[in-house]
Image (cartoon, rainbow, N blue to C red):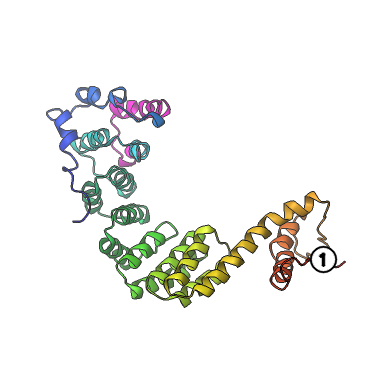
């Protein structure tokens, strides 16, 4: 097992509540007031913890999903000790986590630098779902356990569950880290069939994976097909060209990115000068606002971009009536 080694998932919790299986004897050990939360989580999280813990302590529900909100609020809060105590409380009550609760527990442990416990919980779940797989995939990827991340994805796919836009970026990152172009292409194909290839984060992850596997041409193809791009998408491909030694293409793409940045701000600038877009040619059955967005997002931007690319420095780009 790679990643940080920590004590078992129950050790701290059991130390606090061992010897009592009755709810009343456990209440003082799960009091949220005793937890030293980071300043950014006070006082809202304490209030939420009280609201969540009190019903569990007094009524001890038997359904596993009843405990999921507790682990959700603890995720990222750096209060691992309380999470372990709640986990031990559930165990002593004889409650077996289902996939929904397991996913929240895995996310809590993984966010608290306890990957071993996250893996332990994951392996105890009899019928994992996509939410649970996503949680452990993200945990493995976070700690650089790339091979394990890819193996979980394979197991998930073999079990009949496809990845989504929460799964695929982490798996692609792991494919890139281990240099597995073949597996990365398999994930790409599966994302195409699932429709999540259109997601901007998936697209950027595909670009990064192809670049790191020295397939800049495929990275460019993904880039061109993306319906939406952000700075990370542009940077991933520009860095890919630089890595491949194609400095000229990297510089050209950088200039195009600057033009696109200019065009993004263009509609507000020209409207401030009194320009009103002619939407009479927009034949789609949509609102006037959507017609303006369609025009500014396609025809007018392309026309201005063409003008800029074909105008010498200092020249003027004009729009004919």
- State the image quarter where residue 10 is shown: top left
The residue beneath circle 1 is 319
Q: Is residue 280 left or right of residue 211?
A: right
Q: Position of residue 123 (x, y in %)?
A: 22, 53
* Residue reaching furthest to the left: 19
Q: Is residue 54 magenta?
A: yes
Q: Quadrant of the C terminus?
A: bottom right
Residue that appears at 26% across and 32% down: 82
Question: Compared to 77, does 213 lie above or below?
Answer: below
Image quadrant of residue 90?
A: top left
Q: Main secondary structure of the magenta part?
A: helix
Look at the image and give the residue range highlighted in magenta.
42-68
Where's the N terminus, which quadrant? bottom left
Q: Measuring 47% from the left and 64% from the top, which residue is drawn there?
A: 236
265 sits left or right of 113 in the view: right
> Does residue 234 appear in the picture of this structure?
yes
Residue 126 location in percent, x, y? 25, 54
> On the rendered structure, is 183 left or right of 93?
right
Instruction: Work out whether 243 lies above or below 55.
Output: below
Q: Is residue 303 left or right of residue 59?
A: right
Residue drawn at 25 percent across, 61 percent down: 148
User: Which residue occupies the foreground of this view, 115 or 194?
Assistant: 115
- Residue 244 position in % (x across, y down): 43, 74
């Amino acid at each position: 097992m790679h990643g940080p080694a920590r004590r078992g998932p129950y050790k701290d919790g059991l130390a606090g509540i061992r010897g009592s299986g009755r709810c009343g004897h456990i209440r003082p050990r799960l009091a949220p007031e005793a937890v030293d939360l980071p300043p950014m989580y006070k006082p809202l999280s304490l209030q939420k913890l009280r609201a969540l813990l009190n019903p569990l302590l007094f009524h001890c529900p038997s359904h596993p999903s009843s405990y999921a909100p507790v682990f959700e609020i603890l995720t990222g809060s750096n209060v691992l000790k309380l999470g372990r105590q709640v986990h031990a409380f559930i165990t002593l009550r004889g409650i077996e986590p289902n996939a929904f609760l397991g996913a929240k527990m895995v996310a809590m442990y993984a966010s608290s630098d306890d990957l071993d416990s996250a893996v332990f919980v994951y392996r105890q779940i009899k019928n994992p779902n996509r939410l649970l797989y996503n949680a452990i995939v993200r945990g493995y990827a976070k700690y650089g356990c790339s091979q394990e991340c890819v193996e979980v994805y394979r197991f998930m796919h073999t079990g009949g569950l496809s990845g989504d836009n929460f799964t695929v970026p982490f798996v692609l990152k792991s494919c890139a880290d281990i240099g597995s172009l073949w597996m990365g292409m398999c994930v790409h194909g599966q994302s195409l069939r699932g429709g999540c290839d259109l997601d901007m984060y998936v697209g950027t992850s595909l670009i990064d994976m192809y670049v790191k596997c020295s397939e800049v041409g495929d990275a460019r193809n993904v880039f061109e097909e993306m319906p939406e791009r952000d700075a990370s998408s542009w940077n991933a491909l520009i860095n890919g060209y630089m890595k491949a030694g194609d400095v000229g293409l990297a510089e050209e793409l950088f200039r195009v990115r600057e033009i696109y940045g200019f065009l993004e701000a263009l509609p507000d600038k020209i409207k401030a000068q009194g320009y009103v877009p002619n939407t009479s040619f927009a034949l789609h059955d949509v609102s006037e606002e959507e017609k303006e967005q369609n025009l500014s997002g396609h025809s007018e931007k392309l026309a201005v971009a063409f003008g800029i690319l074909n105008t010498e420095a200092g020249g003027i780009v004009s729009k004919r009536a």
